[in-house]
Image (cartoon, grey):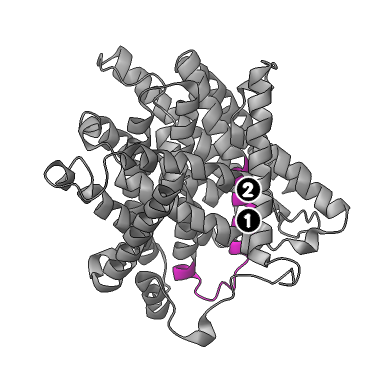
Amino acid sequence: MNDFLTIVAYLSILILSGVAIKSKVKIFQELFIPASVIGGVIGLILGPDMIGKYYSFIPKDWSNILRSIPGVLIVPILISIPLGMQFDKKTKTMKNTINTGGILFLVTFIQLLLGYILNFIFDKIFNIKLYKSFGAELNSAFAGGHGTAGVVARTLKELGAEYWELAQGITVTLATLGLVSGIIFGIYQIKINSNKILKTEILSEYKNGYIKQKDKQPSIGKETMLNTTMDTLAYHVAIIFGVSGIAIISLDIFKYYKIPILSKVTVWSYGMLLMFSIWKMFIKKGIAWSVDAKVKSKITGTLTEFAIVSAVATIPIKALASYILIILVISILGFYITWKLIYKLSMRYFRDYELERSLAMFGTSTGVFITGLLLLRICDPKLESPVLQDYSLGFSITALLGPVLIALCIQLSFTYNYFYPIGILSVLIILTSITLEYYNKRVG
């Protein structure tokens, strides 16, 4: 127990160090690097592959625990996604929301397909053997971000793959490349494609990463419970971790009795379905008021920060060195294809705010949701356009199903080979493209 508290304290110090460094070092502000990533790099430098070779700052037995943290924390992070979701069928922006979701799905499918095709090319043409399940890392990194490295690691670990640490390291590295290059390229596109002036105060707020003015500091959520009963934050934590625990225990039972299909699903896939059912029950019973989506997002945001810092701090540098070529190739191709696809489809299917919509989706597809929001706010500082609503709703659909697809592709490629995900993803791309085209022709 003391080790647990000490490790959390160590990660906390790394995050706080990242905050302090970002507030002082301009290059990190200009590149919008998260404090957790900076803290993770500090941890990496102090780790066993670098300074740790000569002088140990942390106990050697911590290494395995730190590597496992992203895979552990990703479970409650993903399982919590359905909690607090709004099901409003009367939205006037249904067309734009569907188009946004459709484009983001296409990006997901194509990024995954690109990874597995490159695995095939390196294997069959250049006779360079990558690890068997390589392919999902690009999408996990670009569209999922640093935190989603835990999805890759946990899935491979559950399958018994010995290279799960390498896969996690590659995903984290790609996530960093995507985040930085996505922001730089996005701002460049705004400058050359828009007559709007970059708002200094908006950029300054995001660069520094904090808000000094008390009157501008937003609330982290609503107090839905009275402290005489239970703290609101504790209530939300209890729901998230309670459902996570039920999902883990249930899957252990399914695996023990070897129940078909159910014994093979990932814990977060099953957990998300379980949470979805529980949230629907909350709505049906009239107690949905007790859950605040903003409070939930702050809890998962906290878990994500710790997942990121531990993932970056444990990148296996030696093993990663042998994958430098593939990392460069897949990141360059993925970056180029992602922008071209999003920009062309935005121009085709949207009739207003095409640039803003494409930049928001591009930011999300190379970084995280907040990256897309950052680029959108540079274009639209006061968020007066309807883009944020359409973008948020479209993103929530892919956020719900994306991790499940990633896990499925990893399982198929590991159990069989890369031809299985290539086939499935090709079909999904064709069906999604046809559906988008048909829908837009029908609704006009």
Residue 1 versus residue 216: which sits nearer the camera?
1
The magenta-colored residue range is 377-400
Quadrant position of residue 295: bottom right
Residue 403 versus residue 352: which sits nearer the camera?
403
Q: Specify few, some or many for label 1: CA neighbours under 10 Å numbering under 14, 14-19, or 20 or more.
A: some
The image shows residue 367 at horizontal and vertical percentages of: 42, 51
Asked whether residue 80 is in view, the answer is: no
Asked whether residue 61 is in view, the answer is: yes
Q: Which residue is mark 2?
A: 241
Task: Name the residue: 71% across, 58% down.
Answer: 93
Task: Name the residue: 88% across, 54% down.
Answer: 285
Q: Are marks 2 and 1 in contact (CB under 8 Å)?
A: yes
Quadrant position of residue 131: top left
- Secondary structure under badge 1? helix
Q: Is residue 164 left or right of residue 159?
A: left
Magenta region includes residue 387 = yes
Q: In the orientation shown, which residue stands out farthest toward the front?
A: 2
Indicate the amino acid at tag 2.
Phe
Q: Which residue is mark 1?
A: 237
